[in-house]
Image (cartoon, helix red, strand yellow):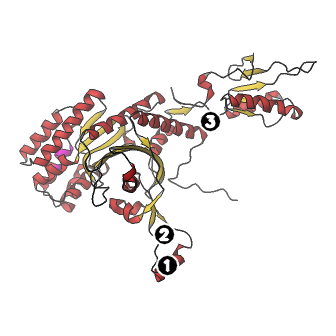
Amino acid sequence: MARPTPLSGFPEWLPDGRIVEQHVLDVLRRTFELHGFAGIETRAVEPLDQLLRKGETSKEVYVLRRLQAADEESAGRARGDSDGAGLGLHFDLTVPFARYVLENAGHLAFPFRRYQMQKVWRGERPQDGRFREFVQADIDVVGAGSLPYHYEVELPLVMADALGALRELGVPPVRILVNNRKVAEGFYRGLGLDDVEAVLRGIDKLDKIGPDAVGELLVAEAGATSAQAAACLALAGISGDDATVVDRVRELAARHDASTDLLEEGLAELGALVAAAAARAPGVLVADLRIARGLDYYTGSVYETVLVGHEDLGSICSGGRYDTLASDGTTTYPGVGLSIGVSRLVSRLLSAGLVRATRSVPTAVLVAVTSEELRSRSDAVAAELRARGVPTEVAPSAAKFGKQIRHADRRGIPFVWFVGDATQDGAPGQDEVKDIRSGEQVPADAATWAPPAEDLLPRAVAVG
Protein backbone atom coordinates (compact mmCIF):
# COMPACT_ATOMS: atom_id res chain seq x y z
CA MET A 1 0.00 0.00 0.00
CA ALA A 2 1.36 3.43 -0.93
CA ARG A 3 1.97 6.02 1.76
CA PRO A 4 -1.42 7.71 2.33
CA THR A 5 -1.87 11.42 1.70
CA PRO A 6 -3.09 13.30 4.80
CA LEU A 7 -6.55 14.85 4.56
CA SER A 8 -6.58 18.53 5.42
CA GLY A 9 -9.03 19.54 8.12
CA PHE A 10 -9.39 16.12 9.76
CA PRO A 11 -7.11 16.22 12.82
CA GLU A 12 -5.65 13.04 14.27
CA TRP A 13 -3.70 13.61 17.47
CA LEU A 14 -0.73 11.50 18.43
CA PRO A 15 -1.22 9.55 21.69
CA ASP A 16 0.15 12.34 23.89
CA GLY A 17 -2.10 14.88 22.13
CA ARG A 18 -5.07 12.58 22.65
CA ILE A 19 -4.27 12.52 26.38
CA VAL A 20 -4.44 16.33 26.42
CA GLU A 21 -7.77 16.27 24.58
CA GLN A 22 -9.21 13.67 26.96
CA HIS A 23 -8.07 15.70 29.96
CA VAL A 24 -9.82 18.80 28.58
CA LEU A 25 -13.02 16.81 28.00
CA ASP A 26 -12.85 15.28 31.49
CA VAL A 27 -12.51 18.71 33.14
CA LEU A 28 -15.40 20.11 31.10
CA ARG A 29 -17.60 17.10 31.83
CA ARG A 30 -16.89 17.31 35.55
CA THR A 31 -17.70 21.03 35.65
CA PHE A 32 -20.90 20.68 33.65
CA GLU A 33 -22.12 17.89 35.91
CA LEU A 34 -21.31 19.98 39.00
CA HIS A 35 -23.80 22.50 37.60
CA GLY A 36 -26.47 19.84 37.07
CA PHE A 37 -26.22 19.25 33.33
CA ALA A 38 -27.07 15.74 32.10
CA GLY A 39 -25.04 14.20 29.30
CA ILE A 40 -26.66 13.05 26.06
CA GLU A 41 -25.49 11.95 22.62
CA THR A 42 -27.41 12.38 19.38
CA ARG A 43 -27.05 10.65 16.03
CA ALA A 44 -24.51 11.93 13.51
CA VAL A 45 -27.05 12.55 10.71
CA GLU A 46 -30.10 14.77 10.39
CA PRO A 47 -32.57 15.44 7.56
CA LEU A 48 -31.22 18.10 5.23
CA ASP A 49 -34.30 20.27 5.59
CA GLN A 50 -33.53 20.56 9.31
CA LEU A 51 -29.81 21.20 8.84
CA LEU A 52 -30.48 23.91 6.28
CA ARG A 53 -32.63 25.90 8.70
CA LYS A 54 -29.47 27.83 9.55
CA GLY A 55 -29.42 29.44 6.11
CA GLU A 56 -25.80 30.41 5.37
CA THR A 57 -24.51 27.04 6.56
CA SER A 58 -26.00 25.28 3.52
CA LYS A 59 -22.69 25.33 1.66
CA GLU A 60 -20.96 23.67 4.62
CA VAL A 61 -23.17 20.60 5.05
CA TYR A 62 -21.76 17.20 4.12
CA VAL A 63 -24.48 15.22 2.38
CA LEU A 64 -24.71 11.54 3.31
CA ARG A 65 -25.27 8.97 0.58
CA ARG A 66 -24.16 5.46 -0.32
CA LEU A 67 -22.22 4.64 -3.49
CA GLN A 68 -25.25 2.97 -5.06
CA ALA A 69 -27.64 5.66 -3.88
CA ALA A 70 -28.10 7.34 -7.27
CA ASP A 71 -29.51 4.25 -8.96
CA GLU A 72 -31.61 3.34 -5.94
CA GLU A 73 -33.02 6.87 -5.60
CA SER A 74 -34.02 6.89 -9.28
CA ALA A 75 -35.79 3.59 -8.78
CA GLY A 76 -37.35 4.89 -5.57
CA ARG A 77 -38.69 8.01 -7.25
CA ALA A 78 -40.24 5.83 -9.95
CA ARG A 79 -42.05 3.95 -7.16
CA GLY A 80 -42.91 7.14 -5.29
CA ASP A 81 -40.59 6.08 -2.46
CA SER A 82 -37.91 8.56 -1.32
CA ASP A 83 -37.02 6.95 2.01
CA GLY A 84 -33.38 7.45 2.99
CA ALA A 85 -32.79 10.48 0.77
CA GLY A 86 -31.82 13.93 2.05
CA LEU A 87 -29.55 13.20 5.00
CA GLY A 88 -26.49 15.16 6.06
CA LEU A 89 -23.86 15.04 8.79
CA HIS A 90 -24.60 17.51 11.56
CA PHE A 91 -22.37 20.61 11.50
CA ASP A 92 -23.12 21.61 15.09
CA LEU A 93 -24.92 20.15 18.10
CA THR A 94 -27.70 22.73 18.46
CA VAL A 95 -29.90 21.61 15.55
CA PRO A 96 -29.79 17.92 16.55
CA PHE A 97 -30.47 18.92 20.14
CA ALA A 98 -33.57 20.89 19.10
CA ARG A 99 -34.82 17.82 17.25
CA TYR A 100 -33.98 15.61 20.27
CA VAL A 101 -36.06 17.87 22.54
CA LEU A 102 -39.08 17.72 20.23
CA GLU A 103 -38.91 13.92 19.94
CA ASN A 104 -38.47 13.35 23.67
CA ALA A 105 -40.39 16.23 25.22
CA GLY A 106 -42.80 13.86 26.95
CA HIS A 107 -39.93 12.20 28.78
CA LEU A 108 -37.93 15.28 29.80
CA ALA A 109 -38.29 17.48 32.87
CA PHE A 110 -38.15 21.19 31.99
CA PRO A 111 -36.15 23.33 32.20
CA PHE A 112 -33.92 20.62 30.72
CA ARG A 113 -30.19 21.03 31.30
CA ARG A 114 -27.92 19.04 28.99
CA TYR A 115 -24.30 18.81 27.96
CA GLN A 116 -23.09 17.06 24.83
CA MET A 117 -19.58 16.26 23.57
CA GLN A 118 -19.40 14.91 20.04
CA LYS A 119 -17.75 15.26 16.69
CA VAL A 120 -19.34 17.48 14.06
CA TRP A 121 -18.55 17.97 10.37
CA ARG A 122 -18.35 21.23 8.46
CA GLY A 123 -17.24 21.59 4.85
CA GLU A 124 -15.24 24.79 5.07
CA ARG A 125 -11.68 25.77 4.16
CA PRO A 126 -9.27 24.37 6.78
CA GLN A 127 -6.92 26.82 8.50
CA ASP A 128 -5.32 27.33 11.89
CA GLY A 129 -7.86 26.11 14.45
CA ARG A 130 -10.56 25.54 11.84
CA PHE A 131 -11.33 21.97 10.81
CA ARG A 132 -13.76 19.94 8.73
CA GLU A 133 -14.16 17.34 11.47
CA PHE A 134 -13.89 18.47 15.06
CA VAL A 135 -15.14 17.94 18.61
CA GLN A 136 -17.56 20.33 20.27
CA ALA A 137 -18.70 20.49 23.88
CA ASP A 138 -22.11 22.12 24.37
CA ILE A 139 -24.31 23.11 27.28
CA ASP A 140 -27.91 24.24 26.89
CA VAL A 141 -30.93 24.91 29.06
CA VAL A 142 -34.30 24.56 27.32
CA GLY A 143 -37.71 25.43 28.72
CA ALA A 144 -41.23 24.44 27.66
CA GLY A 145 -43.19 27.52 26.58
CA SER A 146 -40.91 29.99 28.35
CA LEU A 147 -37.40 30.31 29.77
CA PRO A 148 -36.53 33.00 32.33
CA TYR A 149 -33.82 35.50 31.46
CA HIS A 150 -31.63 34.48 34.40
CA TYR A 151 -30.46 31.47 32.39
CA GLU A 152 -28.85 33.90 29.95
CA VAL A 153 -26.83 35.11 32.93
CA GLU A 154 -26.08 31.64 34.29
CA LEU A 155 -24.84 29.90 31.14
CA PRO A 156 -21.83 32.12 30.35
CA LEU A 157 -20.83 31.97 34.01
CA VAL A 158 -20.93 28.15 33.88
CA MET A 159 -18.63 28.32 30.87
CA ALA A 160 -16.39 30.72 32.78
CA ASP A 161 -16.15 28.10 35.54
CA ALA A 162 -15.41 25.33 33.04
CA LEU A 163 -12.73 27.26 31.19
CA GLY A 164 -11.35 28.55 34.48
CA ALA A 165 -10.96 24.96 35.69
CA LEU A 166 -8.61 24.41 32.74
CA ARG A 167 -6.22 27.14 33.91
CA GLU A 168 -4.20 24.66 35.99
CA LEU A 169 -3.73 22.70 32.76
CA GLY A 170 -2.04 25.68 31.13
CA VAL A 171 -5.03 27.09 29.25
CA PRO A 172 -4.67 30.89 29.08
CA PRO A 173 -7.32 33.07 30.71
CA VAL A 174 -10.45 33.69 28.66
CA ARG A 175 -12.58 36.70 27.94
CA ILE A 176 -16.28 36.16 27.25
CA LEU A 177 -17.68 38.85 24.97
CA VAL A 178 -21.43 39.36 25.22
CA ASN A 179 -24.06 41.36 23.37
CA ASN A 180 -27.85 41.24 23.17
CA ARG A 181 -29.76 40.89 19.91
CA LYS A 182 -32.55 43.08 21.31
CA VAL A 183 -30.07 45.92 21.75
CA ALA A 184 -28.81 45.57 18.20
CA GLU A 185 -32.23 45.11 16.59
CA GLY A 186 -33.83 47.87 18.66
CA PHE A 187 -31.07 50.31 17.69
CA TYR A 188 -31.11 49.40 14.00
CA ARG A 189 -34.87 49.69 13.77
CA GLY A 190 -34.72 52.99 15.63
CA LEU A 191 -32.35 54.21 12.92
CA GLY A 192 -34.90 53.16 10.30
CA LEU A 193 -33.13 50.00 9.11
CA ASP A 194 -35.60 47.17 8.55
CA ASP A 195 -33.25 44.47 7.18
CA VAL A 196 -31.82 43.66 10.59
CA GLU A 197 -30.38 40.33 9.49
CA ALA A 198 -28.34 41.99 6.74
CA VAL A 199 -26.94 44.50 9.25
CA LEU A 200 -26.03 41.72 11.67
CA ARG A 201 -24.32 39.73 8.93
CA GLY A 202 -22.29 42.78 8.02
CA ILE A 203 -21.29 43.63 11.60
CA ASP A 204 -20.34 39.98 12.13
CA LYS A 205 -17.59 40.48 9.51
CA LEU A 206 -15.86 43.36 11.30
CA ASP A 207 -12.87 41.30 12.41
CA LYS A 208 -12.44 39.81 8.94
CA ILE A 209 -12.74 42.84 6.65
CA GLY A 210 -12.54 45.93 8.89
CA PRO A 211 -14.93 48.84 9.55
CA ASP A 212 -14.55 50.62 6.19
CA ALA A 213 -15.49 47.51 4.21
CA VAL A 214 -18.34 46.74 6.61
CA GLY A 215 -19.67 50.26 6.19
CA GLU A 216 -19.72 49.79 2.43
CA LEU A 217 -21.42 46.42 2.90
CA LEU A 218 -24.17 47.96 5.04
CA VAL A 219 -24.87 50.53 2.34
CA ALA A 220 -24.83 47.95 -0.46
CA GLU A 221 -26.67 45.04 1.19
CA ALA A 222 -28.65 46.45 4.13
CA GLY A 223 -29.92 49.59 2.41
CA ALA A 224 -28.25 51.89 4.93
CA THR A 225 -27.27 55.49 4.26
CA SER A 226 -23.69 56.51 5.07
CA ALA A 227 -24.93 58.15 8.28
CA GLN A 228 -26.86 55.03 9.33
CA ALA A 229 -23.85 52.82 8.57
CA ALA A 230 -21.66 55.12 10.67
CA ALA A 231 -24.13 54.87 13.56
CA CYS A 232 -24.12 51.06 13.34
CA LEU A 233 -20.31 51.05 13.43
CA ALA A 234 -20.37 53.45 16.40
CA LEU A 235 -22.61 51.03 18.29
CA ALA A 236 -20.26 48.17 17.44
CA GLY A 237 -17.37 50.17 18.88
CA ILE A 238 -18.85 50.29 22.39
CA SER A 239 -17.48 47.80 24.95
CA GLY A 240 -16.82 47.56 28.69
CA ASP A 241 -17.26 45.44 31.80
CA ASP A 242 -19.50 47.70 33.87
CA ALA A 243 -22.81 49.55 33.73
CA THR A 244 -21.30 52.50 31.83
CA VAL A 245 -21.76 50.43 28.65
CA VAL A 246 -25.52 50.75 28.99
CA ASP A 247 -25.24 54.52 29.50
CA ARG A 248 -23.04 54.92 26.41
CA VAL A 249 -25.50 53.01 24.24
CA ARG A 250 -28.37 55.16 25.50
CA GLU A 251 -26.39 58.33 24.73
CA LEU A 252 -25.63 57.08 21.20
CA ALA A 253 -29.27 56.18 20.61
CA ALA A 254 -30.38 59.60 21.86
CA ARG A 255 -27.99 61.38 19.48
CA HIS A 256 -29.42 59.45 16.52
CA ASP A 257 -33.03 59.48 17.75
CA ALA A 258 -32.89 55.68 17.71
CA SER A 259 -34.36 54.81 21.11
CA THR A 260 -37.00 52.05 21.08
CA ASP A 261 -38.76 49.88 23.65
CA LEU A 262 -36.89 46.84 22.28
CA LEU A 263 -33.56 48.62 22.75
CA GLU A 264 -34.43 49.44 26.36
CA GLU A 265 -35.48 45.84 27.03
CA GLY A 266 -32.19 44.59 25.66
CA LEU A 267 -30.15 47.13 27.63
CA ALA A 268 -31.89 46.09 30.87
CA GLU A 269 -30.93 42.45 30.18
CA LEU A 270 -27.39 43.30 29.15
CA GLY A 271 -26.91 45.43 32.25
CA ALA A 272 -28.11 42.61 34.51
CA LEU A 273 -25.69 40.18 32.89
CA VAL A 274 -22.72 42.54 33.21
CA ALA A 275 -23.55 43.23 36.87
CA ALA A 276 -23.85 39.53 37.74
CA ALA A 277 -20.61 38.70 35.96
CA ALA A 278 -18.76 41.52 37.70
CA ALA A 279 -19.75 39.97 41.04
CA ARG A 280 -19.16 36.28 40.22
CA ALA A 281 -16.37 36.35 37.61
CA PRO A 282 -14.75 39.79 37.66
CA GLY A 283 -12.79 40.64 34.55
CA VAL A 284 -13.96 37.59 32.61
CA LEU A 285 -17.12 38.88 30.90
CA VAL A 286 -17.10 42.01 28.75
CA ALA A 287 -20.05 43.63 26.99
CA ASP A 288 -18.99 44.10 23.37
CA LEU A 289 -21.59 45.56 21.02
CA ARG A 290 -19.80 44.32 17.88
CA ILE A 291 -20.64 40.69 18.73
CA ALA A 292 -23.41 39.86 16.29
CA ARG A 293 -23.33 36.08 15.70
CA GLY A 294 -24.38 35.80 12.06
CA LEU A 295 -26.83 32.92 12.58
CA ASP A 296 -30.37 34.21 12.42
CA TYR A 297 -32.06 32.12 15.11
CA TYR A 298 -30.55 33.99 18.09
CA THR A 299 -33.09 36.24 19.82
CA GLY A 300 -31.44 37.53 23.01
CA SER A 301 -27.97 37.33 24.52
CA VAL A 302 -25.12 36.25 22.24
CA TYR A 303 -21.65 35.22 23.35
CA GLU A 304 -18.16 34.74 21.95
CA THR A 305 -15.05 33.75 23.88
CA VAL A 306 -11.40 34.40 23.11
CA LEU A 307 -8.16 33.19 24.70
CA VAL A 308 -6.27 36.16 26.12
CA GLY A 309 -3.02 36.47 24.20
CA HIS A 310 -4.34 34.21 21.44
CA GLU A 311 -7.06 36.38 19.97
CA ASP A 312 -5.81 35.50 16.48
CA LEU A 313 -7.35 32.06 16.96
CA GLY A 314 -10.83 33.58 16.94
CA SER A 315 -13.68 32.51 19.17
CA ILE A 316 -13.23 29.19 21.02
CA CYS A 317 -16.69 29.26 22.58
CA SER A 318 -19.88 30.88 21.32
CA GLY A 319 -23.64 30.71 21.56
CA GLY A 320 -26.71 32.59 22.63
CA ARG A 321 -30.43 32.66 23.35
CA TYR A 322 -32.84 31.12 20.84
CA ASP A 323 -36.63 31.17 21.14
CA THR A 324 -37.99 29.51 18.01
CA LEU A 325 -35.52 26.82 16.97
CA ALA A 326 -37.63 24.04 18.50
CA SER A 327 -41.43 24.06 18.16
CA ASP A 328 -43.99 21.32 17.56
CA GLY A 329 -46.69 23.76 16.46
CA THR A 330 -48.31 23.77 19.88
CA THR A 331 -45.44 24.33 22.27
CA THR A 332 -42.25 26.28 21.67
CA TYR A 333 -39.08 25.27 23.51
CA PRO A 334 -36.86 28.32 23.98
CA GLY A 335 -33.29 27.80 25.05
CA VAL A 336 -29.88 29.29 25.68
CA GLY A 337 -26.57 27.55 25.13
CA LEU A 338 -22.88 27.79 24.45
CA SER A 339 -20.50 25.56 22.53
CA ILE A 340 -16.76 25.10 23.04
CA GLY A 341 -14.66 24.23 20.00
CA VAL A 342 -12.62 21.58 21.78
CA SER A 343 -10.51 20.68 18.75
CA ARG A 344 -9.71 24.35 18.11
CA LEU A 345 -8.68 24.82 21.74
CA VAL A 346 -6.57 21.65 21.87
CA SER A 347 -4.86 22.46 18.56
CA ARG A 348 -3.62 25.76 20.00
CA LEU A 349 -2.55 24.20 23.32
CA LEU A 350 -0.42 21.69 21.42
CA SER A 351 0.92 23.89 18.63
CA ALA A 352 1.89 26.69 21.03
CA GLY A 353 3.54 24.24 23.43
CA LEU A 354 1.32 25.34 26.32
CA VAL A 355 0.42 21.83 27.49
CA ARG A 356 2.06 18.42 27.36
CA ALA A 357 1.24 14.90 28.48
CA THR A 358 3.38 13.40 31.23
CA ARG A 359 3.66 10.29 29.06
CA SER A 360 2.08 8.97 25.89
CA VAL A 361 0.96 5.55 27.19
CA PRO A 362 -1.29 4.59 30.12
CA THR A 363 1.23 1.98 31.31
CA ALA A 364 2.87 2.80 34.65
CA VAL A 365 4.83 -0.46 35.05
CA LEU A 366 6.65 -2.76 32.64
CA VAL A 367 7.21 -6.20 34.14
CA ALA A 368 10.53 -7.56 32.90
CA VAL A 369 10.81 -11.14 31.63
CA THR A 370 13.77 -13.18 32.85
CA SER A 371 13.26 -15.94 30.26
CA GLU A 372 10.44 -17.08 28.02
CA GLU A 373 10.12 -20.23 30.17
CA LEU A 374 9.36 -17.97 33.17
CA ARG A 375 7.09 -15.50 31.36
CA SER A 376 4.11 -16.86 33.28
CA ARG A 377 5.59 -15.46 36.51
CA SER A 378 5.79 -12.00 34.92
CA ASP A 379 2.22 -12.39 33.67
CA ALA A 380 1.07 -13.25 37.19
CA VAL A 381 2.71 -10.11 38.65
CA ALA A 382 1.13 -7.97 35.94
CA ALA A 383 -2.31 -9.48 36.62
CA GLU A 384 -2.00 -8.74 40.34
CA LEU A 385 -0.98 -5.15 39.73
CA ARG A 386 -3.81 -4.61 37.25
CA ALA A 387 -6.30 -6.06 39.73
CA ARG A 388 -5.30 -3.23 42.06
CA GLY A 389 -5.74 -0.60 39.36
CA VAL A 390 -2.12 -0.19 38.26
CA PRO A 391 -1.79 -0.02 34.44
CA THR A 392 0.78 -2.70 33.62
CA GLU A 393 2.21 -4.52 30.64
CA VAL A 394 4.76 -7.31 30.26
CA ALA A 395 7.98 -6.91 28.27
CA PRO A 396 7.66 -8.11 24.66
CA SER A 397 10.72 -10.37 24.86
CA ALA A 398 13.18 -11.84 27.36
CA ALA A 399 16.00 -9.61 26.17
CA LYS A 400 18.79 -8.37 28.41
CA PHE A 401 17.43 -6.24 31.22
CA GLY A 402 19.17 -3.16 29.84
CA LYS A 403 17.28 -3.54 26.57
CA GLN A 404 13.98 -4.04 28.42
CA ILE A 405 14.65 -0.88 30.42
CA ARG A 406 15.38 1.06 27.21
CA HIS A 407 12.10 -0.27 25.76
CA ALA A 408 10.24 1.13 28.79
CA ASP A 409 12.08 4.43 28.49
CA ARG A 410 11.19 4.82 24.79
CA ARG A 411 7.52 4.28 25.61
CA GLY A 412 7.60 6.65 28.57
CA ILE A 413 6.86 3.93 31.14
CA PRO A 414 8.29 5.16 34.47
CA PHE A 415 8.75 1.85 36.35
CA VAL A 416 10.26 -1.54 35.50
CA TRP A 417 9.45 -4.55 37.69
CA PHE A 418 11.93 -7.39 38.17
CA VAL A 419 10.56 -10.74 39.33
CA GLY A 420 12.79 -12.24 42.04
CA ASP A 421 14.60 -15.52 41.41
CA ALA A 422 13.15 -18.50 43.24
CA THR A 423 15.10 -19.67 46.32
CA GLN A 424 16.72 -23.12 46.52
CA ASP A 425 13.69 -24.56 48.26
CA GLY A 426 11.40 -23.21 45.47
CA ALA A 427 9.95 -20.30 47.42
CA PRO A 428 9.38 -17.06 45.45
CA GLY A 429 12.27 -14.61 45.59
CA GLN A 430 12.09 -10.90 46.42
CA ASP A 431 10.69 -8.74 43.60
CA GLU A 432 12.12 -5.29 42.97
CA VAL A 433 10.85 -2.24 41.12
CA LYS A 434 13.03 0.40 39.48
CA ASP A 435 12.16 4.03 38.81
CA ILE A 436 14.07 4.39 35.56
CA ARG A 437 14.05 8.19 35.81
CA SER A 438 15.91 8.38 39.12
CA GLY A 439 17.57 4.98 38.98
CA GLU A 440 16.21 4.08 42.44
CA GLN A 441 15.44 0.36 42.80
CA VAL A 442 13.64 -0.98 45.86
CA PRO A 443 12.06 -4.24 47.07
CA ALA A 444 8.38 -4.48 46.17
CA ASP A 445 5.34 -6.73 46.64
CA ALA A 446 2.69 -6.78 43.89
CA ALA A 447 0.01 -7.20 46.58
CA THR A 448 0.80 -3.84 48.21
CA TRP A 449 3.05 -1.68 46.02
CA ALA A 450 1.63 1.25 44.07
CA PRO A 451 3.29 4.05 42.14
CA PRO A 452 3.02 7.62 43.42
CA ALA A 453 -0.37 9.12 42.60
CA GLU A 454 1.10 11.45 39.99
CA ASP A 455 2.57 8.47 38.12
CA LEU A 456 -0.44 6.16 38.20
CA LEU A 457 -1.96 7.56 35.00
CA PRO A 458 -0.73 9.92 32.30
CA ARG A 459 -1.73 13.52 32.88
CA ALA A 460 -1.86 16.73 30.91
CA VAL A 461 0.26 19.40 32.56
CA ALA A 462 1.19 23.00 31.85
CA VAL A 463 4.56 23.57 30.22
CA GLY A 464 6.91 25.79 32.16
Mark on residue 84? 2
Residue 405 visible, this orientation = no
Q: Nearer the viewer, residue 36 or 367?
A: 36
The answer to whether the residue labelled 1 contacts the one labelled 2, judged by CB atoms less than 8 Å apart, is yes
Q: Nearer the viewer, residue 52 or 329?
A: 329
Q: Is residue 393 above or below residue 120?
A: above
Dominant secondary structure of the magenta stretch?
A: helix
Q: Secondary structure at mark 2?
A: loop
Q: Which residues are magenta?
A: 232-237
The spot of residue 122 in percent (x, y) is 44, 56
Judging by the rendered image, the residue that carries numbered circle 1 is 76
Judged by depth in the image, the label closer to the viewer, 3 or 2, is 2
Q: Amino acid at mark 3?
A: Ser
Q: Secondary structure at mark 1?
A: helix
Of the two numbered discs 1 and 2 on the same chain, state the one appearing first in sequence: 1
Judging by the rendered image, the residue that carries numbered circle 3 is 360
Q: Quadrant of the N terminus?
A: bottom right
Q: Residue at x 52, y 35 (%)?
A: 23
Q: Amino acid at mark 1?
A: Gly
